[in-house]
Image: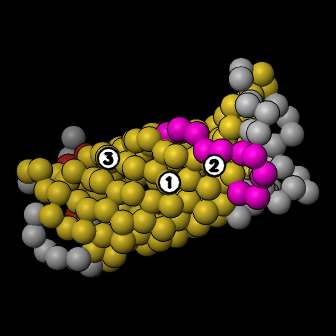
Amino acid sequence: MRQKVIIIPLLLLTLIFSTSKMAAQNTSVGFKGGPALTGISNLEGASGKLGGRVGGFITYSVSRSFGIGGEVNLVRKGFQAGNGDHIHLDYVEVPLLAQFFVGRGGCRPKIIVGPYGAYLLQATADGEALDAYQSQDYGAVLGAGFHQRVGGRKWLYFDVRYGYGIAEVQERMDYANRDISVSIGLSFPLDNWMDL
């Protein structure tokens, strides 16, 4: 079950993004990263802490105003417990996102929405390993941002998103991850990569 959280979205992405020349003309790839304010729901005395994410993404543009995207991110979530412990939860996270674009110029605002699945790499409290945390996480993402053309078909990528965890972080405990993140990155057309 644990591996399904990561494997199923990756298989879906493989089916969606074939590597034919025609599909490549409508497909872009890139990398991004940025800070996040992370926390946990329903835990009395807990407060948020600074985390972050870095990763890569692929987007298939179905039309000028709609695209489907997938990402693979290394994400640090966590919180500060009421006793002062700093809890770090490091995940591999795979969102599958619908992207709605507005406009046709050099700056294209967008709205993003979709599910994510994640696998816990490690959980620590002030450097000490913890084993009480669930190995998988899943939830939903909602955000907004823009793509700014920076030359040819290359785009500067920016978004702000809210991650709403649904899975329990600890078994039989009604705690779930929450985060607000800011990402900046660059995207490139896939057919440029295929011609190398």
Q: Give the range drawn in magenta.
A: 41-53
Amino acid type assigned to the residue bearing label 2 in the image? Gly
Mark 3 or mark 2: whose residue is earlier in sequence:
2
Labels 1 and 2 touching (C-beta < 8 A): no
Report x, y in % for residue 113.
47, 71
Left or right position of 77 against 60: right
Spatial CA distance of label 3 from label 1 is 14 Å
Q: Using the rendered image of the protein, determine whether residue 12 is visible from the camera's viewpoint.
A: no
Labels 3 and 2 touching (C-beta < 8 A): no
Mark 3 vs mark 1: give the one in front: 1
Left or right position of 182 against 22: right
- Pick the quarter of the image with the N terminus: bottom right
- Is residue 42 highlighted in magenta? yes
Mark 3 vs mark 2: give the one in front: 2
Report x, y in % for residue 64.
22, 77
Which is nearer the eye, 97 or 52?
52
- The quarter of the picture where residue 101 lies is bottom left
Which is nearer the eye, 144 or 32?
144
Badge 1 is on which residue? Answer: 180
Badge 2 is on which residue? Answer: 39
Badge 3 is on which residue? Answer: 184
